[in-house]
Image (cartoon, coloured by chain):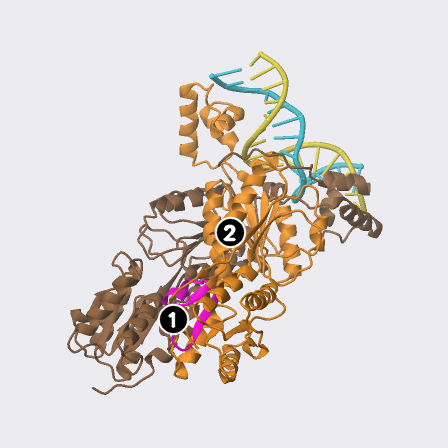
Chain colours: A orange, B brown, C yellow, D cyan
DNA sequence: TTGAAAGCGCTACCAT
DNA sequence: ATGGTAGCGCTTTCAA
């Protein structure tokens, strides 16, 4: 835990001090603090408020939590805190939680060990609920089956559980999103559609590849492995450039490229433009994630949106619902990934 | 506070249960939990560990906090949580805090009322320290002069205080950053340098305008008000396009444009390219903030970096230092804003 | 080497 | 309409 050796400059003003100053009992002060004022004499309440003011008193939630065993805080364990997309979810989760009277205690966790430590900590701090915002990397969740009975409710976003666990869960439909993108391209006359796939270690990459294959099949197009190249979004941009060049070297070259995420797509855009190809007239480009910067690329990037905001909102709402109704059956939600059409795909083909 | 009416499914296992199971006193268990094991008999310790394991016990930090009056958590009040740049600071603050044994409790605050509420909450939750990550909007901080003596130490990032308050503070040098950008442009042969300024309500915008004027003067260039247009980054992108067009309509038009932030710069880039101008050969463009996407624009964007990461790191470090040494004098840090040269400015001029 | 008991600041029950 | 008091789960003297 590190060494927490420090003296607070001044002793805290307590409910006792307030009671004494107002000439009432602590019970009465407590009642006043908790809006149990119906049966309270006006002047008493006033004296208490006056005492609170003049002593600059703030009730201790720590003491309150000890007796109520509720902390009014929710733990958020975020795996990919370096990804702006995931961090962005915070922007929506925090206000909803706050409006419901909860604060968010943030823990980032890069791996299983971090994650276990975070969970332990949140249990020790007695948070009222936990949200996992996960990567699509496979993580062993065996330890989650051994939580104490007193553990708070848990909501899991974007994670395939490896053990039977009946938590509330939220996923998004990577397969469906990719199918939507391919279908859109086919409808605009494309038949030579390439996929820059992400690393196989990610469930999301696998699912998108799956969606790509299925969509081709649906539209009676042949799967050509030359049109599928690895563009690992964790590797260097130079590798994405090379992957793009490999696609362009195929004969005949693709007329549309699905990129493994929006950053890769931006680099693809640039690579195409630098060899003199026009987007979308010569090649259409579609990204993945719908990061904010998509709108101001040149051309603005068409992309398969990951519903991270909805996921964050739903997660906190599900948690609040469960807090209100602990015994309701657990819920599984699959959010759609929808195609957001912008300029980088807006041309029709005939070849 | 909302209504927190809920029963925990199961009673918590307490230190008492552990003591009983191990056949020792709670004191001894407490000693074991807090590594005071020097004078402890081996078998006793083993029995305790065994009991902890089999009961699946987690000590309550709430109870611990009540007696130690330390919570091992730090409050972060973040004004512009919607800005990826500010959110990004979290990625660096959280791990440092965690390594030092602290968690981060997050509060977003859009205005003064939010902020006051957040501060009150953090005081009630008895966090060990508070970091303010502020906008450059002017906010009244009178209420901060009236905090109770028991209030924890505070570190303030990016805020000009309106009242005498001796908190640790971190700023960054917007004036210097803009001077660096203009100087760089002058050295590359530019003399017609335009500024898309941000809204006057922001200190940062005012400071950048100030830096622009000073730099022109330093280099013996005349201030031409036609070269200064408003591009409010809170307004619509269409207004930035118009501001850019106004600059291009000036005779003679500028050969370089400093944008109010990177997003505006991206739109400027696109606007220039769409009227057939090449960047940087015809016009150089420089952004502000150094957001991650700068690197994969086409051309990659030269920008004046805002040291948000360093600010976050320094803030948490300053807080930890103060926690260790409460009585050290307060510290004021001014971090440099340095020019990050990329492709959008890499051409020399002679006209 | 271990234990008993006071007390952290509050809530909640039971009195009056 | 208000108060006394037990007790939340832990740490921390002080004693044994």
Residue A59, placed above or below residue A264: above
Q: Nearer the viewer, residue B276 or B283?
A: B276
The reply to whether residue B316 is visible in this rendering is no
- Number of on-image labels: 2
Quarter-of-image position of residue A49: top left
Residue B12, placed above or below residue B288: above
Element under disc 1: loop
Question: Disc 1 to disc 2, how far (Cα)?
Answer: 34 Å
Task: Give the magenta-colored segment's residue range.
Answer: A280-303
Q: Which mark is residue A347?
A: 1
Element under disc 2: helix
The reply to whether residue A79 is visible in this rendering is yes
The picture places residue A207, in percent across and down from the top left corner, at 59, 64
Q: Residue at x 40, y 46 (%)?
A: B115
For the residues carrying marks 1 and 2, which lies nearer the camera in this image? 1
Assess disc 2: are there few (<14), some (14-19) or many (≥20) residues with their C-alpha within 10 Å of its C-alpha: many
Q: Residue at x 58, y 74 (%)?
A: A223
Q: Nearer the viewer, residue C12 or A9?
A: C12
Q: Which residue is mark 2?
A: A312
Task: Kindly identify which chain the residue marked by label 2 belongs to.
Answer: A
Q: Is residue A295 magenta?
A: yes
Q: Which mark is residue B300?
A: none
Q: Is residue B289 magenta?
A: no
């Amino acid at each position: 835990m590190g060494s927490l050796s420090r003296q607070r400059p001044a002793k805290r003003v307590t409910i006792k001090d307030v009671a004494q100053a107002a000439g009432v009992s602590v019970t009465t002060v407590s009642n006043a603090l908790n809006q149990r004022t119906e049966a309270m004499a006006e002047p008493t309440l006033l004296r208490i408020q006056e005492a609170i003011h003049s002593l600059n008193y703030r009730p201790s939630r720590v003491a309150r939590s000890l007796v109520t065993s509720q902390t009014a805080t929710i733990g958020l364990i975020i795996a990919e805190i370096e990804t702006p997309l995931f961090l962005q979810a915070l922007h929506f989760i925090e206000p909803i939680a706050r409006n419901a009277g909860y604060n968010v205690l943030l823990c980032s966790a890069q791996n299983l060990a971090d994650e276990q430590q975070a969970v332990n900590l949140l249990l020790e701090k007695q948070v009222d609920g936990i949200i996992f915002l996960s990567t699509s990397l496979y993580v062993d969740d065996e330890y989650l089956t051994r939580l104490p009975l007193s553990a708070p409710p848990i909501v899991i976003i974007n994670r395939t559980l490896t053990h039977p666990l009946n938590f509330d869960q939220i996923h998004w439909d990577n397969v469906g999103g990719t199918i939507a993108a391919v279908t859109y391209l086919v409808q605009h006359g494309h038949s030579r559609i390439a996929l820059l796939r992400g690393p196989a270690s990610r469930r999301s990459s696998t699912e998108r590849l799956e969606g790509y294959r299925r969509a081709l099949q649906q539209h009676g197009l042949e799967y050509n492995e030359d049109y599928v190249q690895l563009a690992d979004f964790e590797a260097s941009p130079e590798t994405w450039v090379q992957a793009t060049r490999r696609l362009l070297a195929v004969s005949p070259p693709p007329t549309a490229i699905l990129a493994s995420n929006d950053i890769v797509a931006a680099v693809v855009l640039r690579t195409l433009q630098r060899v003199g190809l026009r987007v979308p007239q010569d090649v259409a480009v579609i990204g993945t994630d719908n990061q904010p910067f998509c709108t101001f690329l040149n051309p603005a990037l068409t992309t398969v949106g990951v519903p991270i905001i909805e996921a964050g909102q739903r997660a906190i709402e599900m948690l609040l619902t469960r807090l209100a109704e602990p015994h309701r059956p657990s819920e599984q939600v699959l959010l759609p990934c929808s195609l957001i059409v912008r300029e980088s795909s807006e041309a029709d083909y005939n070849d």
